[in-house]
Each structure stands twice: as structure tokens, then as C-alpha cells.
Image: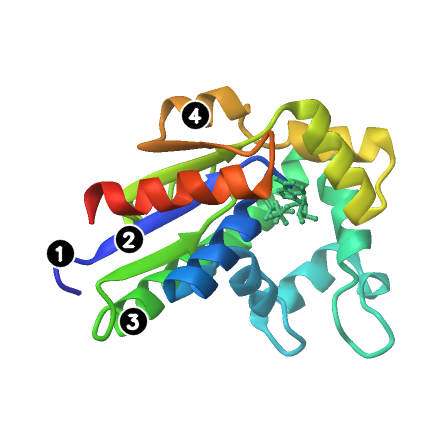
Amino acid sequence: MGDSTRLIGITGGIGMGKTTVSDYLAIAHHLPVLDADLIARDAVEPGSPILSKIVDRYGSNLLRLDGTLDRSKLGAIVFSNPTERTWLEQQIHPYVRQTLVIECDHLSKNHSTIVLVIPLLFEANMTDLVTEIWVIFCPESQQLQRLMQREKLSLEQAQARIQSQMPIQQKRDRADFVLDNSTTLEALMQQVDRALSLTS
Ligand code: ATP
């Protein structure tokens, strides 16, 4: 990979607008986007070594009839138990990191800017994979509302997921660019345009 490739790492709290921003960067600015969540899903596809380890640990009742992982059952285990969450992350994060490195290397042959959406950029110590960090944030009340609506989670479940992550203020402190998603989509996109133009 050339030293000059611009690698934008997008992060923020759950449901604060990462995908909204990366979709916009892909559609309006034609930038390639790598999504750590999608890679993490690939990591546990049927037949994968990581899925076998998960089944060994928690039993085959975590599998659906078609052999795919029942993510909500796994979520119920790991979001209420930090030890299990750590174990699961130790299985998945190395795969995500390795895949991001390989895909960035590949994309950098044809693109001078690449977007990486990494929800756990700080928690999983992946900041070395990017050349700049954008943190998207909105107030927690708005985050809770978006999360409960979209994922059909109870207030307690939504709060448990939020609390499993690093507090948003700590993420903001470590950002190169902070994007405020507390108002309209239009206002958000204006900030994205500005962040993109700043160092390019
Ligand atoms: P996750 O962490 O779960 O992947 P995310 O950070 O990618 O979430 P999005 O999926 O982009 O967040 O946004 C969460 C929800 O909030 C989506 O349904 C999105 O359409 C909505 N949303 C995001 N920003 C705004 C906004 N400014 N105004 C209204 N709705 C918004």
C-alpha cells in the first residue's frame, strides 16, 4: 500500500449514524467502503472455524435450522456477560483486522481514499489501520430512541449495548474530526463534505 493512501476510519456509538455517513461517502463521493461489521458476520458463516468454536462453547442451540448463527441468542449471552464478550471478540477481531488489511491493500491499487467503518475502532485497538479518525455522535437520548426503534430492543437491552462500548466522549476526544448528528441529515452531510475536503 502506498504511504499516501488516505484511510478514513469512521466510528461512533451504536446507532449514531456511521452507516448513514459511509453510504453517503459511497454514493455521493464514490469512495470504496469497508465495513468491519459485515466482515465480522462473514467470520461466523456456516463452516467457518470461528462458528465451530462458538458452538463448542455455547452449544448447537445457538444455530438456526439452516445452520446459520442465531445472532440475537448470541447477543443475549455476550451483552450481559463481559467475560463472554471478551472471549467472542478475541475470536473475531483478528479475522476482521486481517481482512481489513488485505482489502485495503487491494483497493489502494485503484483508490487514493478508502473508508473503513469500524464500530469498535478504539475498543479493538484498530486505530493503526487508518490515517485519520472521524467520530459521529448524537445525544444518548436520540441514540436510545434510534436503537430501540430499529432493533426492536427494550430500553434495558438498548442500554446494555450502549454501555458495552467506550463512552462517546472518550471517542470524541480521540477523533481527528467530530461529526454532530443531532439534527438533520442535510446538516450531517455538510459536515462530511467539509471533513472530506479538509485534508484532500
Ligand atoms: P450501528 O452501530 O447499529 O451500525 P450506525 O451508527 O451505522 O448504527 P445508522 O444505521 O447510520 O447508525 O443510523 C441509525 C438509525 O438512525 C438509522 O435508522 C438511520 O436512518 C437513522 N438516522 C441516522 N441519522 C439520522 C438523522 N440525522 N436524522 C434522522 N434519522 C437518522
Residue at (82% x, 43% y) in the render? 149
Q: Is residue 32 left or right of residue 165?
A: left
- Residue 107's tag is 3
Mark 2 and mark 3: Cα distance apart in space: 11 Å
Mark 3 and mark 1: Cα distance apart in space: 13 Å
- Residue kind at label 2, given as amino acid type: Leu
Mark 4 and mark 3: Cα distance apart in space: 28 Å
- Find out if the beta carbon at label 3 lies less than 8 Å from the nearest ligand 1 atom: no
| Label 2: element kind | strand
Check disc 2 and report the residue beneath it: 7
Mark 4 and mark 1: Cα distance apart in space: 25 Å
| Label 1: element kind | loop
- Residue kind at label 3, given as amino acid type: Leu
Quarter of the image that includes the N terminus = bottom left
Q: Residue placed farthest to the left in the image?
A: 3
Residue at (31% x, 32% y) in the render? 176
Instruction: Residue 117: give x, y in percent of width and height.
Output: 46, 52
Q: Residues within 10 Å of mark 1 (few under 14, many from 20)?
A: few
Check disc 1 and report the residue beneath it: 4
